[in-house]
Amino acid sequence: MKTTLELPDDLLRRIKLRAVHRNRRLKDEIAQLLEAGMAEAPAPEAPRKPPRPVRLRGRRPPGTREIEEAIASGRE
């Protein structure tokens, strides 16, 4: 597959030199470097499920004022 990448000049220069010293094509060297980087990268974490909503039995849901008071009391 073909793609276009924008790389910093210094980085591209170093990759080109590396490819020349290893007698490889630039695209093969870039592919090898990407494969090596992907192999060392940690596996992404599975997305976490959001917490279940709290259900208040027999009470009306708290209003904005009550929520703000609860937040303020937790900061003290």
Image: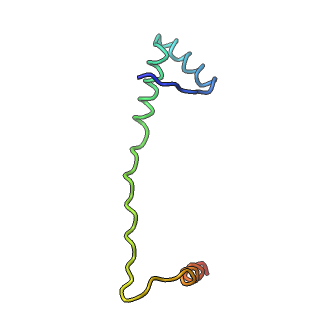
Q: Residue at x 45, y 33 (%)?
A: 37
The percent position of residue 25, horizontal first and vertical second, equals 47, 13
Is 50 in front, or is 15?
50
The percent position of residue 13, horizontal first and vertical second, equals 60, 19
Picture quadrant where residue 70 is located: bottom right
Picture quadrant where residue 39 is located: top left
Q: Residue at x 43, y 86 (%)?
A: 60
The answer to whether 44 is drawn above or below residue 3 in the figure is below
Is 75 in front, or is 47?
47
Give the farthest residue toward the bottom: 58
The percent position of residue 61, horizontal first and vertical second, equals 45, 82
Q: How many marks?
A: 0
The percent position of residue 22, horizontal first and vertical second, equals 47, 13
Give the farthest residue toward the right: 9
- Report the quarter where the C terminus lies: bottom right
Q: How is the image coloured?
A: rainbow
Residue 14 horizontal side relative to residue 39, left or right: right
The answer to whether 57 is drawn above or below residue 12 in the figure is below
- Report the quarter where the N terminus lies: top left
Q: Residue at x 41, y 88 (%)?
A: 59
